[in-house]
Image (cartoon, grey):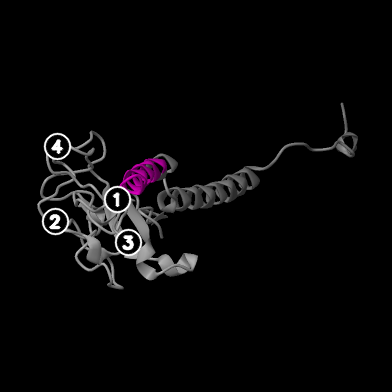
Amino acid sequence: MPSAFSRVGITQRGVTLVELVVFIVIMGVALAGVLKVLEITGRNSADPLVRKQALSIAESLLLEIQQQPFTFCDPDDANASIATSSTDCTTQTQDTDPAGAGAIAGPFPGSESRYSNTNPFDNVADYGGFSMPNAACAGICNPNDTTPLAGLGAYTAAVTISRAGGVFGLSNDAALRISVRVTGPANTDVTLSGYRVRYAPNI
């Protein structure tokens, strides 16, 4: 019959119930903390798809504006291609205050519309103060079309145009700075800027 002394020296393995419970509690608290951090980070970070969509809207509208004419006179004016100052225009200048220093408010003439096929925006200054949605378009729309593009109802776009010739060492009205701001879901806010320099007849 083995004696009590024969068990001496046997190494015990495993953990006690108390140790197991403590381990589970510690790991649970740590995991909860990590998940909370991930939740906060995910909630406050910008959705890359939403930001990319906002950038696409801003890029498209900025390119549309930059491709418009920029002369002393409105493109409908007979002297648009030859005028050397706004005083040479027969009827219409590029905007209502060609010598002004503030932001340009378009369109000019006021009857023009981005969505009209017969009397559309036809110069850079027409876009001054333009925004979407607006009275003619309930969302983000293509030119000459008042049908909102599907899936873009949560986005807005706004255009600011100001004279910026001094940036290039020119007269202040010789160049325009175009800023397009687009907002979207999850506090997305994107602003793109570009410039348009007068090309006719000479700067």
Mark 4 residue crowding within 10 angstroms, few (<14) / some (14–19) / many (20+): few
Q: Amino acid at mark 4?
A: Asn
2 or 1: tag closer to the N-terminus: 1
Give the residue at x 54% y 46%: 31
SS of the residue at dot 3? loop
Residue placed under numbered mark 3 in the picture: 84
- Circle on res. 81: 1
Query: Pointers 4 and 3 in contact (CB under 8 A)?
Result: no
Residue placed under numbered mark 4 in the picture: 117
Give the residue at x 88% y 33%: 3
Which x, y percent locates residue 172? 38, 69
- Circle on res. 109: 2
Q: Nearer the viewer, residue 47 or 52?
A: 52
SS of the residue at dot 1? loop
Q: Nearer the viewer, residue 184 or 41?
A: 184
Q: What residue range appears in magenta?
A: 52-68
4 or 1: tag closer to the N-terminus: 1
Mark in the foreground, 4 or 3 = 3
Which x, y percent locates residue 133? 19, 49
